Amino acid sequence: MSADELRGLLGEWAREAGVPGVSVGIFHEGKETLLTAGVSSVDTGTPVDDGTLFMIGSTSKTFAATAVLVLVEDGVLELDRPVVEYLPDLRLADPLARKTVTLRHLLTHSPGFLGDIEVDTGWGDDALARAVEQFDELPQVFPVGEVASYCNAGFLLAGRVAEAVSGGTYEDLVRTRLLEPLGMTDSCFQPWEVLTRRHAVGHALREDGPAVAHTVGLARADAPAGGLWSTARDQLKWARFQLSGGEVLSDETRRLMHAAQREGALPFEEIGLSWLRLSHGDAQLVRHGGNVSNLQLSEFVMVPSENFAVTVLTNSAGGGALGPRVVDWCLENVADLPKLGNRPIQAIDPGDCPGRYRTGSLIFEFTERDGSLWAQMILDTDQPDVLSAPPFEVAFVAEDVLARASDTRRPSARFRRDSLGRVDAVESGGRTALKLPGSNIG
């Protein structure tokens, strides 16, 4: 089926999801298709077009990892040397972590220190350095390398190492070594660059519909973890490079980035060097995606075996539903992958699984309601435009493994038990969150 057949569905699906504007890019066997629907802002009514910039959020991590690997190929960095050898003034809360954490740990979400942080050190060229100076305040939740838990802070540290070794700013490194060589001229980091171009603004979902949120959502120091603005057209250039190679990185290293480095935390099955891996039948998905404060959400999914990629850029929390819907349609109708069937629901007593689990400002809450188990991700923040996601029903598809009750095709959470068999943590959203004492919720 042609990707163009999605064109007639996109606007309807966006309205159903409460997404004011969406831009989609599809690459398959050398052919590119760009689709758009809606507006960049409900206040201005400016239509989204192929050149509209969106915040891609955490897909930015794949640029940070590639920048690090460019420097590895230059011979000035090594993945398995302690990063303190490149940043002698580095301070971490745990002395052993300071001595042992490596770039490989950082790029595979396994340094063990708190990953979800909010740090605003201004918009100067020293923003990233000043942010890393505060890392001695981050608790060491797990020993280095023991647990995979999605770690934004780790990518800030990786970006700072790359910045320090390159001798310029992190943004300049990415621009000169990645964006310019790949012809990604519509991608940038700084708000003052964005303001001179067509760009989408984030929207909060209100009872009366999407409303413009008057915030960017990220500080400059967050650039390696989530700060890149881009277009679907430029994201397809990134996909071409990731699938076929290019001058910025050797094919061997590029493939190493996609390869499994360690087991992931659900919903990710494995983790490469920044890339997240999921199976789809017999096919391997290599993916990322982004969520900037529930205001701009994106998807980026590749199937290397099919020479296929799709990116979906949206400007409201509704992108959390729209993005996967578009991706699944493309996997089935463009890449010709089989449609996944639902996994059977298991009648398992939740026992001590209900409760609250925290990692940084994120709280995963599981509650029993009339014989059903419900989940909610709560953002513990004082930003009025950043809303917690609504609760949804979950169900067991295996012992200690959950999926959304409405869609059990892929597991979304897994409870972890201690040596005595008690639930002490949960994997959800790619994070491993510890159970809060006394938080059992019936």
Image (tube, grey):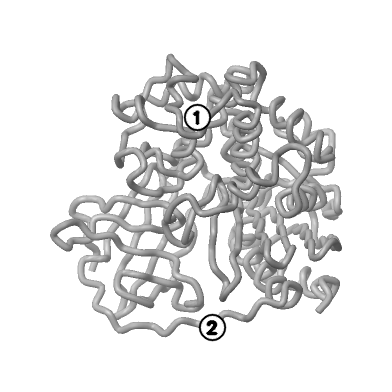
Which residue is depicted at the point 45% across and 54% down? 430
Tell me the crowding category of disc 1: few under 14, some 14 to 19, or many 20 or more residues within 10 angstroms, Cα based: many
> Which amino acid is tagged 2?
Gly
Label 2: element kind: loop
Spatial CA span between label 2 and label 1? 40 Å
Which residue is depicted at the point 57% across and 72% down? 280
Q: Is residue 369 above or below residue 150?
A: below
Q: Quadrant of the rendered structure where residue 115 is?
A: top left
Give coordinates of residue 284: x percent, y percent.
59, 65
State which quarter of the image contains the N terminus.
Answer: bottom right
Q: Is residue 28 above or below residue 79?
A: below
> Which amino acid is tagged 1?
Leu
- Say which of 141 and 213 sits in front: 141
- Evaluate whether residue 216 shows in this view: no
* Residue to which mark 1 is pinned: 157
Give coordinates of residue 242: x percent, y percent.
71, 50
Q: Quadrant of the rendered structure where residue 198 is?
A: top right
Which residue is depicted at the point 69% across and 46% down? 251
Give coordinates of residue 423: x percent, y percent.
23, 60
Label 1: element kind: helix
State which quarter of the image contains the C terminus.
Answer: bottom left
Direction from residue 350 to residue 302 in the image, left or right: right
Give coordinates of residue 335: x percent, y percent.
73, 72
Which numbered dot is residue 341? 2
